[in-house]
Image (cartoon, rainbow, N blue to C red):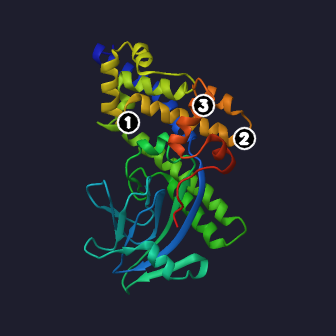
Amino acid sequence: MEMSSSAAAGRSRETAVADWHKPLFDDLLRGIRLQSSVYFRPEFRAPWGISVARDCAVFHIVDQGTCWLQVKGVAEPVKLSEGDFVVIPRGQPHTMRDQLSTPTVNFFELVHAHSSGKNGLMCFGGSGDVTRFVCGGMVFENCNSNPLLAVLPPLLHVKRIEQGARPWLGLTTQHILSELNSREPGAKEVVTRLADILFIQAVRSYFEDNVETADSGWLAAVRDRQIGQALAILHSHTHRPWTVESLAHRLAMSRSTFAARFKELVGEPPQRYFTRLRINAAAARLRTGVDTLSAVAAGAGYRSAAAFAKSFKRHFGTTPGEYRDFGVGCPPLA
């Protein structure tokens, strides 16, 4: 039976989207670099409630029990169960508690007021049911310019117990708990690498689950025939001095139509998005410590080292040379 023209066109569009979204996702995931991390192992007995806010990615693994999570920017509270893994990519204020009506206290005030016990466990709350976590902060290199952190939603939630659950979640979280319990040399470094893997897996799952259904935001832009191709071009050719005019011409669109459509879907003007990509790529080269400033500037599409240095300082608050010597990250979790 021959495929109808509409079905064939639909299949063609799906293939085209796949052609450019996979390299895009690869580029974003490849840019994840965990600079440092901090871990806590709190155990709460009902009633309990905590509030958390930090200028870095925060994650929680539910080791035992259940709780309610509310994140600023997410309309509905989320019920978490044993084995669930959640990430608040930009550290927005959020609360966790046994019941939605339970008052909360600042988590870090609790931590500073209590010493940890065996294997880093900290016990809080009343005398009711137990909920135990592994919590932490993930400080990424270049968090202020990293394009991935800018396009993620305020909450990533990977459920362990559901139809089609991904086996990597249980295996990786169990490995993390085993390392934390072992107290072997290098355990914290191993846990940091495992948390890095968990984050990448969570982001990849988010992409896979939403790329075909998102009706707004960056993933909807990826699916758009013209804006998706523009994103693919920008990510694969960061060294070229793209302008709104040159991109629009490449896509056979008018400058005004392209700029308006890009901003509508992506959430920011194309030139601002591309500048962040270029600066992030340049910062990655600076970290290697082998290229001259002029070479890094040229590789990022800047016509002079002075123009590059000015743009770099505007984004990072420091010069390229200072960044190369000392690095710049996000504020630590604690």
Corner quadrant of residue 95:
bottom left
* Front-lying residue, 76 or 58: 58
Task: Please indicate whether residue 334 sits to the left or right of residue 260 in the image.
Answer: right
Q: Name above or below for residue 217 compared with residue 74.
A: above
* Front-lying residue, 16 or 284: 284
Figure disc tally: 3
Name the residue carrying label 3: 306
Q: Residues within 10 Å of mark 3 (few under 14, many from 20)?
A: few
Which tag, 1 or 3, sits closer to the chain's start? 1
Which tag, 2 or 1, sits closer to the chain's start? 1
Task: Please indicate whether residue 194 sits to the left or right of residue 229 in the image.
Answer: right
Residue 214 visible here = no
Name the residue carrying label 2: 289
Residue at disc 2, secondary structure:
loop
Q: Residue at x 38, y 55 (%)?
A: 162
Type of amino acid under label 2: Gly
Type of amino acid under label 1: Leu
* Front-lying residue, 122 or 128: 122
